[in-house]
Image: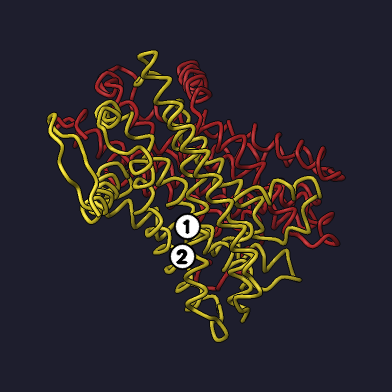
Amino acid sequence: MEYKNIFNNKEIKVSIIERIAFFLRGAQYSYKALFAWLVPQVYILTKIVSPMFQILFFTYLGRFYARDLQSTYFVVGNAVQISALSSIYGIAMTIASERTEGTLIQLLGTPASRIRIFISRGLMHILDGFFSIAIGFTFGFIFLGINFENTNFFLLILTLFITIFSTSGLGMVIGSMGLAMREINLLSNLAYSLLLVFCGINYPLSRLPLILRGISYSLPLTRGVQAIRIIIGGGVFSDISSLILEELCIGFLYLTIGFIFFRFLEIYSKKNGTLEMY
Amino acid sequence: MNKLLSIAKVQLMMRVTSTMWIFVVIIQPILFLIMTLFIMDIEIRETYTMAAILGAGMMGTWSSILFSSGGDIDRERRWGTLEMIVGCPTPLWYIIGGKSLANGFAGIISMTLSFLTALIFFDGRLSITNLFWFIIVLLLNIISLSSLGMIICTLFTISRAARGLMNLMENPIFLLCGIMFPITILPLWTRPFSYVLSLTWGIEGLRMAVMGIVDYQRFLFHILMIVLLTIVYLLISAKLFLIVEKKAKKEATLGVY
C-alpha cells in the first residue's frame, strides 16, 4: 500500500512501512531530545530509586494504619501507579517542551500528520512506564513478598499496557495544556498526586465518600489497578474483561480530549500568531 | 538580624510565585493527610488523626526546604545573580541561611492547613495538650531543618544531578524519620540513619507535646538531640560553604553549569 506525499512541490510515494518508520523515529527522537530526565544519574534517581521509596513508604504506612489490608495491596498499587512518572510527567514534559525548546514552530510548520506527531510523543513513555512497573514488581517480589504464583503473565502484561496507555491519555491532555500555559509542573504534580488519592492505589474506593468515587471512575488507572490486583490474585480474563475494556475507553477518551486541545491550540495560535506566546 | 529577616522576606515573596512551592507547601501536605486518613481503619482514625496532621505539616516543611533550598544557588546561577551575591559584603552563608529560614518557616503554612483540613473534612477532635512545648518544638524543628537545608543547598551546588537528588530525598526522609508512623516498625538496621536526622526527634517531640508529655526526661532528651544535630548541621554547612566559595573563586566557575 502506498500513499502520496508532497515534497518540494513533487509528489513522492511513501509506503506504509516508511510511515511506520517515520512514526517510530519521531517517537524515539522526541523521547531522546525532550525528556529532561534522560540523563543517566537523574533517570536512575528519579525513575528507579525514588519510586522504590514511594512503594516502601506507603507499604509501611499501610502496615501501621490499615490492619485490614495486606502489604501486597500497597506494593501492587504503588508499583502500578509509579508508571505515571512516565505517562504523566514524561509525556507532558515531552509535548510541552516543544514550546520551551523552541521547536514548536518548526514542528507545526511541517505537513506531517498531527495525530502521528501527537501519539508518537507518548510511545516511548508507555514502554518506559512498563519498565518502571517491572522494576517495582521485582522489588516487591524480592523484598516485600508479592506472590505471583497464580498470576497469568500474558494477561498481566496486556492489562499493564492498557493501564499505562490509558494514563498516558491524561498525560497527553496535560501536555497539550502545557503548550498553552506555564504551569506544566504544577499540573503534572497535581495529576500524579490525584491519581494516588482517587484511584484506589492505597485504599479501596469504598473508603472514599460516594461523591468522590465519581471522580475515581472518571480517571484512568482506577479500573486498571483493580484488574491488576485481580490478575495477581489468580483472576482470569472473564473476571477483568469489563474493567480493561472500560479502562481502554477512558484512555481513548482522554487521548481524544488531548488531541482536540492540541489541534485547537495549533489552529488558534496560527490564526492569532501566538504560537510561542503564553 | 535585620539583614537575615530582610533576606528571608524577599525569599518568601519570591517563592510564593513558584507553582512548585505552592504544590509542596499547600497542596501536597493536604493530599497526603487525606490519603493517610483514608488508609487508616475507621476505628483508629480518631486516635491517630493528630499524628497524621503533624506528619503532613512537617512533610510540607521538609519539601519546602528540599525543593527551595536545593535549588536556591542553582536559581541564582541561572538568573546571573550568583556572582553578585558571592561578591557582596554579606557572607554567602548568611544569605543562604536567610533563604533557608524562610523556606522552613513556610512549613507553618502546611501545618496550619493540615489542621484546618482535618477539622473541616474529617470532623477531627483536635487538641494540643502542651501548646507551649508544641510551639517550641515546632520552631526548633523549623530551624533545624533550615540548617539541614543549608547543607543540601551547598551539596546540590556541587552536583549536576541536583534535580534527581531532590526527587530522591523526599520519600526516604519521610520514611526514615517516621514522619507518619513510629520508626520502630522499620528494620533495625535503618535506626542509625533515622537518628542522625533531627526530624526523627522533632516529629516524636511534636507528638509528645500534642498527646501529653508523660516522661519529661525523655521529652527533654528529644529537644537536646534536635539542638545538638542542628549545631552539627550548621558546622557542616559552614565548612561546605567555605569549600564551595573557595573552589568557585579559584576556578572562576561560579556562573558555569
Q: Is residue B137 visible?
A: no
Check chain identity for marks 1 and 2: say if they share one. Answer: yes
Residue A259 image offset from top left, x and y in percent: 46, 38
Write down the chain letter for disc 2.
A
- Tags 1 and 2 in contact by the CB under 8 Å rule? yes
Q: Secondary structure at mark 1?
A: loop
Q: Which mark is residue B190?
A: none
Chain the render paints red: B
Disc 1 designates what residue?
A83
Q: Observer-nearest residue: A75 or B30?
A: A75
Mark 2, other Cα within 10 Å: few <14 / some 14–19 / many ≥20: many
Disc 2 designates what residue?
A133
Q: In the orientation shown, which residue stands out farthest toward the bottom?
A: A149
Chain the render paints yellow: A
Residue B123 image offset from top left, x and y in percent: 86, 44
Mark 1, other Cα within 10 Å: few <14 / some 14–19 / many ≥20: many
